[in-house]
Image (cartoon, rainbow, N blue to C red):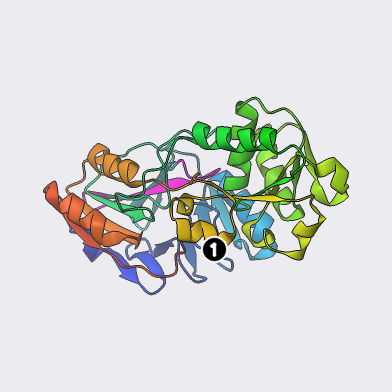
């Protein structure tokens, strides 16, 4: 068996597979990219050739238009393609619509690159599937024991209780435009809320894209077309940058909420001006990360973009050979 680090290398542009001549989630435009999901820090514009799931490619086209890849190749979960003697397949990551882990096999060894992932159910995407491998490359956004996210149902119930308690105030909820906003919409509907939900215009395109993949959001309306009277006691979703923007002044006595795993940290909640912090994350928390390491069962672990040291220490305690890759160019959730 050839050691994986001899053919899958850390470079300034990201993880590079030398025999296949492709990058995984490159941080700059390259000739050939395999992309795990549509968030901008993983799916960059300007690549010549892009391989990803159909949904991820659709997201890239929606965001980048003619910069989304000159040649695009969509493959389904579990489908295998071969490039330069390297077998590539994708497995569900449970992060956002179309998100995938990249499974690469070469010279008798298998490496799984997780991309971003979570383990809890998400009504807008296929759940994470553990894949056995020789090396597991994991994200570490919330890789500290303090990060143990409560249930989604608990946080949505908190929001709906506040809506009932303050019927004269618009509830302005900050949510990232890709993944978080659509997941919140479905969670609110699953909690039994059937009134209209109002959207900032910046959330509309990707929400329409999700709907095109069969996700039902119920009655959605553009917030810009509503009067102040109409928005009293209503739920309004907007990107985080709009929470303190002039745009929010159109709302009646807005009660500001923010949906993010970082709402566990009071300083972050204050920074966002969140009167109602909602701890809802599209990244695995500490328990999910450590469970995944055990489920995958890889003898080696490479940790990237996040709180790498704590996860390396945990894995080493299990007898796993663990190290931090220290890749740069990947942002924290909602940055």
Q: Is residue 54 above or below residue 32?
A: above
State which region is magenta: 94-110
Question: Circle 1 — which element?
Answer: helix
Q: Residues within 10 Å of mark 1 (few under 14, many from 20)?
A: few
Is residue 32 toward the left or the right of residue 148 in the image?
Answer: right
Q: Which residue is mark 1?
A: 271
- Does the rendering let one see residue 124? no
Front residue of 150 and 2: 150
Q: Is residue 64 visible?
A: yes
- Estimate the x, y position of residue 119 in percent, counting from the top left: 40, 38
Residue 49, position as x, y percentages in the image: 53, 61
Q: Which of these two is toward me, 176 or 91?
A: 176
Residue 81 coordinates in the image, percent (x, y): 42, 47
Q: Is residue 212 magenta?
A: no
x 13%, y 50%: residue: 317
Q: Residue extending furthest bottom? A: 12
Res 160 → quadrant: top right
Q: Against 294, is 46 above or below?
A: below
Task: State the residue in front, 325 or 228.
Answer: 228
On screen, residue 123 versus residue 18, left or right, reads right
Point 45% across, 46% down: residue: 100
Residue 132, how many percent across, how many down? 26, 40
Residue 96 inside the magenta-drawn segment: yes
- Residue found 54% across the figure and 63% down from its top: 271
Q: On the picture, is 252 further left or further right than 237?
A: right
Q: Most extreme residue toward the top, as rendered?
A: 192
| Number of numbered tags placed on the structure image | 1
């Amino acid at each position: 068996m050839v050691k994986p680090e001899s053919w899958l290398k850390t470079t300034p542009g990201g993880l590079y597979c030398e025999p296949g001549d492709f990058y995984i989630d490159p941080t700059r435009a390259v000739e050939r990219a395999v992309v795990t999901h549509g968030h901008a820090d993983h799916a960059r514009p300007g690549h010549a050739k892009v391989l990803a799931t159909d949904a991820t490619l659709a997201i890239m086209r929606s965001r980048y238009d003619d910069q989304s890849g000159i040649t695009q190749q969509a493959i389904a979960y579990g489908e295998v393609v071969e490039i330069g003697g390297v077998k590539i397949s994708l497995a569900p990551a449970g992060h956002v619509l179309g998100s995938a882990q990249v499974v690469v096999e070469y010279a008798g060894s298998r490496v799984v690159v997780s991309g971003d992932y979570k383990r809890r159910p998400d009504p807008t995407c296929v759940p994470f599937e553990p894949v056995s491998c020789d090396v597991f490359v994991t994200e570490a956004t919330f890789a500290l024991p303090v990060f143990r996210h409560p249930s989604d149902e608990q946080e949505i119930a908190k929001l709906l209780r506040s809506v009932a308690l303050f019927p004269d105030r618009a509830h302005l909820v900050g949510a990232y435009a890709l993944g978080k906003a659509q997941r919140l919409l479905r969670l609110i509907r699953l909690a039994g809320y059937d009134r209209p939900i109002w959207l900032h215009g910046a959330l509309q395109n990707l929400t329409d894209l999700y709907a095109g993949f069969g996700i039902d959001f119920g009655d959605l309306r553009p917030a810009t077309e509503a009067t102040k009277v109409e928005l009293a006691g209503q739920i309004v979703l907007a990107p985080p940058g709009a929470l303190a923007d002039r745009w929010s002044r159109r709302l009646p006595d807005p009660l500001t909420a923010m949906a993010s795993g970082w709402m566990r940290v009071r300083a972050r909640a204050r920074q966002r001006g969140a009167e109602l912090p909602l701890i809802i994350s599209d990244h695995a928390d500490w328990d999910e990360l450590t469970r995944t390491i055990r489920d995958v069962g890889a003898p080696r672990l490479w940790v990237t973009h996040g709180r790498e040291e704590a996860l390396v220490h945990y894995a080493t305690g299990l007898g796993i050979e663990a190290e931090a890759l220290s890749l740069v160019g990947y942002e924290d959730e909602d940055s």
